[in-house]
Image (cartoon, grey):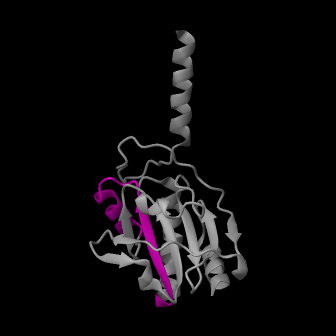
Amino acid sequence: MRFVRTTAAAVTVLLAATACSSGQDVKDSRQGQTGFVSGSGRVSSFAPADREKAPDFGGTTLDGKKWNSTDAAGKVTVINVWGSWCGPCREEAPDLSDAAKELGASVQFIGLNVRDLDPAPPLKFVEAFGVTYPSVYDPSGKLLLKFRGQISPSSIPSTLVLDKQGRVASRVLGPLTKQTLLGMVKDAS
């Protein structure tokens, strides 16, 4: 019995240590969800002949507006998958915001907010980090599942850069920097 308790305690400590969280004041709204896996942050780039079409997706943004990927037709598009509960998402948010401001309307930025069961924490996140681009609210993760094969549903944050034809030009599983993202956008143009 002692072995079972010791093993259970070790598993609990391991899960707590590997879960995505930080001590910042953005409330965890996942209500006990686990399963976060942070990627390495390494860029995977794809030659034009090897690029796969990204799935069409859309929904309601955190500010209550409708958004659809067809709205970005003909533009390089940055899709960032994030959650307010995710420490690496907090780490990269200022760089994403700065890149979006620098690139302006020439590039479509869209967030995909996942696993936040209550919209209040992601709204607080957006305000705290000065995120100016819209984010589609996907608490169930159904929209994220459309990207199966391109993004692992447990790799949060993840970022895709689509070329003007809506194909995946590059991908990062894990947090990224502004300079990395600017390079990915340049390569997709």
**Residue at image x 31%, y 76%?**
66
| 143 up-or-down from 14: above or below | below
Residue 121 position in % (x across, y down): 33, 57
Q: Where on the picture, by quarter, is residue 143?
A: bottom left
Residue 111 position in % (x across, y down): 44, 70
**Residue at image x 40%, y 72%?**
130
Residue 99 visible in the snapshot: no
Say which of 162 and 12 sits in front: 162
| 16 up-or-down from 23: above or below | above
Residue 64 position in % (x across, y down): 26, 72
| 11 up-or-down from 18: above or below | above
Residue 137 position in % (x across, y down): 35, 64
Q: Where on the picture, by quarter, is residue 182?
A: bottom right
**Residue at image x 60%, y 69%?**
177
Say which of 146 and 161 sits in front: 146
Using residue 183 as the reference point, say whether residue 128 is left or right of it.
left
**Residue at image x 56%, y 42%?**
18
Residue most extreme to the top: 1
Q: Which residues are magenta?
A: 105-129
Residue 184 visible in the snapshot: yes
Instruction: Please check the rendered image and state whether residue 118 is part of the magenta-colored stretch, yes or no.
Output: yes
| Screen quadrant of the C terminus | bottom right
Instruction: Please check the rendered image and state whether residue 127 is part of the magenta-colored stretch, yes or no.
Output: yes
